[in-house]
Amino acid sequence: MQKDFLEELDHELLGWDSIENKEVELSPEENSPSWKEEVLPQKEKNKPVFLGKKFAHENKKDTQEGGDGEDNAQFLSLKQTMMSNFPEVKFYLPSIRPGYTRFIPIGWNNETWAKNMNMFQYWDDILLVDCWIQFAEPDMLGANCSIPDISFLLPYKKNIKGLIITHAHLDHIWALKHILPALDFPTIYGTKLTIWIVKKWLEENKILHLQSFVEVNTDNNELIPIWDHFKCEFFRVNHSVPDCAWVYITTPGGFKAVHTWDFKIDFAPEIDKPADLARIWEYGRKWVTLFLSDSTGSTRKWFSTSEKEIGATLEKIIAHHTKGRLIITIFSSWISRVQQIINACEAYDKYVFLSGRSMVENVAISKELGYLKAKPGTIKKMSPKTTEWIPLEKQVIITTWSQWEEFSALSRMAEWKHASIEIMAWDTIIFSSSVVPGNERSVIGVINKLIRLGANVVTKDDREVHTWGHAFQEEQKIMLNLVQPKYFMPIYGDLYFRNAHKNTAMSMWMKQEDILLLDNGQIVDFGPDSKVFKSKIKAPIQDIIIDWHGIGTLTSHVIQAREKMMNAWVLVLLFKVDAKTKAILGPLKVESRGLVYLDEVRIIHKIIIKKAKSIYENTIKDVPEIEEKDLVKIIKSDLEAFLLQKIDRSPMVVPMILEV
């Protein structure tokens, strides 16, 4: 459990107590300390079981009969059901030939910042890689985000032997609270920092006790067996969060894949060691069947900017800042950027304040694991009492900036709703982060609010205060030359970006027929002779949207209803009728929202009442014994057609009949 971190910040960042899990060595024949599985106490007793669509636990010893404990257990069960209730689909994976290895992209094609997840299959064993979210698109009305559609995997959850998480960005792990319960909690594989941040996330969602982990070390050259058919080796790469990993995947059929996610080549990272290019070259000598590589930066020429340059810029800004507070916005997992800010503040006698729960938690974890270093007293808790005695120009506030969350710390500052920070004249806000494509308008809106409050805003368009965590074209070429794959698959991004990556590969030595651009759900089998078989069958992949804790599809009636309400709004009619004669008693009650303007209300409502009454009475006259549900359908349909013809508007019509 975490100590009271905020109370300790005035003295020194003491971090977290270790999460209380027992650790034992896996598989005696490996006899290696560099990877281990954490077996959680009584995991089998607490293992979730699905009873139809109901989530339950076999061990209910903590439930109190008839008391608050029982109510809490029922609430938790309902919450878990909502979190993991994927739609049912009738689909069966086609048979796989002996010796073949199957690959299916579950998400990431034709999407940027997307719900990325990949599936490998050999015989009956299935291995999954990553578990991203996608920021809500404009057509995902009312949704928070979209997650990978693993509905077709539900009948095969016993075959899923592991889930590899490549790094600790929130968008890579957020969907775990939905995916893990649905798939019966497959073992998670990842590096130390990744595992710890995942643990915290699962603990917040009250499912940590059900999950097992295997912690891997990217500095050890060893193949880790994942059950019978997969062996994986993890190796070091660079990105915007420390302790990232690529994975080398092999199967008994001779299939060998090098699987990347986000990466860049940085020879001067702040915390990490540089990418292990020598080991990547060694994989290339092993005749790699398939190379899957990040395409996000594929339209950008030359090399991405090094973190060292960003650190130098931030140091200059901190050194010369003399008026107001300095507020730096970053993603909470960008620990290397936090270290750069700490270093500069210590050099120029300034103090670091942390704003945002996820920022505090990630700094605590990183400090505990030794990824982050700070002198006692450098980092302070963010509160009016701790800041009042420190001059404004010595305050450097690191705050979270989540572009898909309206309640992120910076958004609350811009609205003057933050509990500890009120933006004042002379404050300087540095956006040390990228704008997620599609979020440009909302970001500009926040910047406008900050400027109106008197703040000075600095973005990467003004100075080198941020760099991408994704490889540009020359870095992509280096990786292709090192791996030398038989087949190449650009991944992660719209077709536009993946096609640009394809063109880069073809400008080198790769043939067009050896480059695979797949759609989500497309099934590809790789044979022992390196031949590729593309199935005509596709796994059904839908847009699975998250609306707080609920799960739905983009094509569901809920989204269709929201779309209709957004475009033409709502009309509600209440018919008060005699229970025996069905005659209307008194005037109809009409309520509309967004349908008509103020000066139209009286005349249009009068027309609607007259038409609705006519439809009701004529229908009852023609079919006296009509059922209420059929009567409501007729009123709704006829009135919608009438309004479309009469006022050229098509609202959601909601007729209600009250018998008295």
Image (cartoon, grey):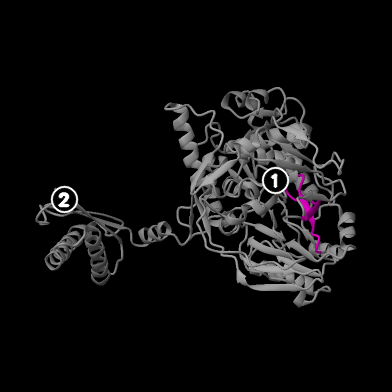
Write the residue at 55% across / 31% down: 420
- Looking at marks 1 and 2 on the same chain, the residue that comes earlier in the sequence is marked by 1
The one of 391 and 143 positioned closer to us in this rendering: 143
Q: Position of residue 212 (x, y in %)?
A: 69, 40
Q: Label 1 neighbourhood size at 10 Å, few (<14), some (14-19), many (20+)? A: many
* The quarter of the displayed image where residue 354 is located: top right
Query: Label 1 is placed on what type of residue?
Result: Ile
Q: Position of residue 353 (x, y in %)?
A: 65, 32
Residue 234 counted in the magenta span: yes
Q: Which residue is mark 2?
A: 659
Secondary structure, mark 1, is strand
Circle on res. 188? 1
Magenta stretch bounds: 229-253
Q: As drawn, is 15 to the left or to the right of 650? A: right
The one of 217 and 591 positioned closer to us in this rendering: 217
Q: Is residue 452 visible?
A: no
Q: Position of residue 594 (x, y in %)?
A: 31, 57
The one of 584 and 620 positioned closer to us in this rendering: 620
Q: Is residue 593 above or below residue 335?
A: below
Query: Label 2 is placed on what type of residue?
Result: Glu
* The quarter of the displayed image where residue 456 is located: top right
